[in-house]
Amino acid sequence: MHPALSFSARVIAGAGRGRVIGSPTLNLEVRKVPKDLRHGIYACCATWNKQPRDAVMHFGPRPVFHAGIACEVHVLENFRITPKTVTVHVRKRLRSVKKFPSVEALKRQIAKDIARARAMLADR
């Protein structure tokens, strides 16, 4: 766990898979992620324009899509304008990256991750 770990990264274009499966993400420059952060799913806070927003972050490979390492942040509230840069404050590691048998199985797990992150972040 990295309760005090924070980093800032530029938002980059992604493949749009998160939007397609109902969990849109901000894709961040992987090279800006601290080297000691393990691959996994994290409850976090994403901040831009001095506004903190609860979020869930995936850092690591995307085995369901046979894709390489990415850092993707799903913000738990709606926002209108995509930021150019985001500061991520990592709160708690929720789980490791897993390969799911289908996109549907991944979507079910994402819903569980989001619910767990919401509950954990509400207790701050």
Image (tube, rainbow, N blue to C red):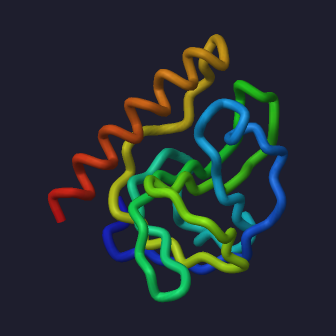
Residue that lies at the very extreme toward the left in this rendered image: 123
Residue that lies at the very extreme toward the front in this rendered image: 80
In the displayed structure image, the side of residue 101 where residue 43 appears, left or right:
left
**Residue toward you, 96 or 19:** 19
In the displayed structure image, the side of residue 103 where residue 46 appears, left or right:
left
Which quarter shows the N terminus?
A: bottom left
**Does 120 appear above or below 83?**
above
Give percent across and percent down for residue 31.
Answer: 74, 70
**Residue at 73% in and 70% down:** 11
**Residue at 48% in and 38% down:** 96
**Residue at 71% in and 59% down:** 27
Residue that lies at the very extreme toward the top in this rendered image: 101
**Residue toward you, 38 or 92:** 92
Give percent across and percent down for residue 54.
Answer: 39, 61
Give percent across and percent down for residue 7.
Answer: 55, 78
**Does 115 appear above or below 73?**
above
The answer to which quarter of the image holds residue 33 is bottom right
**Residue at 67% in and 75% down:** 83
Number of numbered discs on residues: 0
In the displayed structure image, the side of residue 9 where residue 51 appears, left or right:
left
**Does 56 appear above or below 29?**
above
**Residue toward you, 28 or 47:** 47
Give percent across and percent down for residue 34.
Answer: 59, 71
The answer to which quarter of the image holds residue 124 is bottom left
